Image: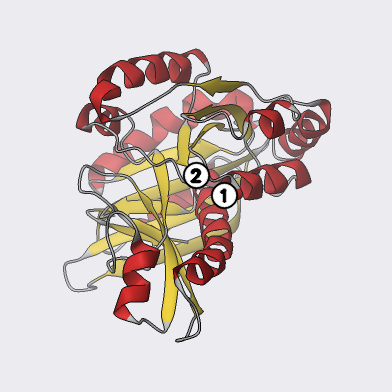
Amino acid sequence: MNSYSEGKIQAFQKKNENRARFLIKCPDQPGIVAAVSKFLYEHNANIVASDQFTMNPEGGEFFIRIEFECPDLKEQVSKLETRFVPIAEKFNMEWKIMYVRDIKNMAIFVSNEPHCLLELLWEWQSGDLMANIALVISNHETAREMVESLGIPFYYIPANKDIRHQVEVKQKQLLEQYEVDLIVLARYMQILTPEFVGHFENRIINIHHSFLPAFIGAKPYERAYQRGVKMIGATSHYVTNDLDEGPIIEQNIGRVDHRDNGEDMKKIGQSIERSVLARAVKWHLEDRIIVYKNKTIVF
């Protein structure tokens, strides 16, 4: 981490040392919001933001994200988490409290096209992407200079389908060494094994260069051109073992016409890819996403 980014992170942590976020999902029923609000009130916490959603109000699923301030939060962590358990059990909740001061460690995987990586680095340098970019892993040397110039460790690990398991052993060792919380595939053009994906469930974010579910798999721009589409897009999603079919976090589109060939579409699409991936990563870092089956609730 360079001193510029380290300074921004330290200032962010100081500002948010008493702030936390509740993420809750459970069967919908009366009294959930009242119970959580009362719990926070009893612990002298002030709610600063609250968003909720009920999927199918008649017997459906309830989701809520609450951001709150609590004096001397660091000393109260254990007490808060222990005392909330009876409430969680009463409402059959899946829940977690995320402490804003705990900056997430992020690894970026990239291949030979650096545009999405560059966007993440720009956002990180500006302080708009609040994470510690712990390392970058690539199966090409293309991005080494731009990454190392920012003081970020860069690891070149050649990869292909024939040595996939050996490669992932090395990658896992590095991810454990750097205590990585989130993996971002910034146009990393390798398929991950089920074992790797399962180990990092809902912690791997990918960018796919089409508006899913259209053009799943390889060469979507070429296929879009052949199909004569009038709009192309990009999709950021969590990685599952179904190729390009994981829970979608963010999407966007751009218009094209008959004058645009495959290369034109690729150039237009790369701009969309950059912004879509950056937004998805920010929302994950800000604890705005709850995964439900193969969907996401994004607050």
The amino acid beneath tag 2 is: Ala
The amino acid beneath tag 1 is: Cys
Quarter the N terminus occupies: top right
Q: Mark 2 points at which residue?
A: 186
Q: In which quarter of the image is residue 195?
A: top left
Mark closest to the chain's N terminus, 1 or 2: 1
Give coordinates of residue 71: x percent, y percent: 68, 36
Front position in the image: 59 or 181: 181
Q: Which residue is drawn at 27% across and 60% down?
A: 216
Q: Residue 60 carries which label?
A: none
Front position in the image: 294 or 208: 208
The local crowd at label 1, few if under 14, some if 14 to 19, many if 20 or more residues have their Cα within 10 Å, is many
**In this picture, is 172 found above or below 272?**
above
Left or right, 280 with respect to 219, comes to right
Give coordinates of residue 4: x percent, y percent: 83, 32
How are the colours assigned in the image?
Answer: secondary structure
Give coordinates of residue 254: x percent, y percent: 51, 77
Q: Residue at x 35, y 63 (%)?
A: 220
Measure the alpha-carbon separation of dots 1 and 2. Answer: 5 Å
Left or right, 92 with respect to 12, comes to left
The local crowd at label 2, few if under 14, some if 14 to 19, many if 20 or more residues have their Cα within 10 Å, is many
Front position in the image: 144 or 129: 144
Q: Say what secondary structure mark 1 lies in.
A: helix
**In this picture, is 50 found above or below 13?**
below
Q: Say what secondary structure mark 2 lies in.
A: loop
Asked if the residues shown at circle 1 and circle 2 are in contact, with their CB atoms under 8 angstroms apart, the answer is yes
Left or right, 124 with respect to 224, comes to right
Q: Mark 1 points at which residue?
A: 116
